Amino acid sequence: MAGRVEEEEEKAVFDAEAAGALVKELRGTFSSGKTRSYEWRVSQLKSLLKLCDENENEIAGALRQDLSKPELETIVYEVTISPHHLSR
């Protein structure tokens, strides 16, 4: 047990050098255009909302078949609440 305590003491709580390098790397990735725009992300969420709306019965059937999920639970939690979060 003494070895474990010593091992925990050696771990740095915050490594400023590593954090700085990570921030620099992430900023470079963002600046490169590799990440998608806000508008693209909103467009994808709207498409997902449309998909959910147009396929409610198929989603409910798949959840019933694959997970034996009751219809009421599917309607309340999957068909109603999930799209609500997408439309925020």
Image: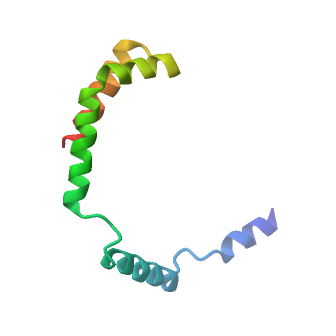
Residues 72 and 56: in front is 56
Is residue 67 placed above or below 23 in the rendered structure?
Answer: above
Q: Residue furthest top?
A: 71
Q: Residue at x 52, y 21 (%)?
A: 66
Q: Residue at x 35, y 71 (%)?
A: 34
Q: Which quarter of the figure has residue 40?
A: bottom left
Q: Which quarter of the figure has residue 80?
A: top left
Q: Please tell me how many numbered marks the rendered image carries.
A: 0
Is residue 16 placed above or below 73 in the rendered structure?
Answer: below
Judge from the rendering whether residue 42 lies leftward or rightward of residue 30; answer left or right.
left
Residues 47 and 68: in front is 47
Is residue 52 placed above or below 66 in the rendered structure?
Answer: below
Give the image location of residue 23, x and y in percent: 41, 79
Is residue 18 placed above or below 37 in the rendered structure?
Answer: below
Judge from the rendering whether residue 70 lies leftward or rightward of residue 18; answer left or right.
left
* Quadrant of the image containing the C terminus: top left
Judge from the rendering whether residue 67 lies leftward or rightward of residue 86; answer left or right.
right
Give the image location of residue 37, x and y in percent: 24, 64
* Quadrant of the image containing the N terminus: bottom right
Q: Residue at x 44, y 22 (%)?
A: 63
Colour option used: rainbow
Q: Residue furthest bottom?
A: 17
Residues 79 and 8: in front is 79
Q: Which quarter of the figure has residue 78?
A: top left
Q: Residue at x 74, y 72 (%)?
A: 6
Judge from the rendering whether residue 24 lies leftward or rightward of residue 15; answer left or right.
left
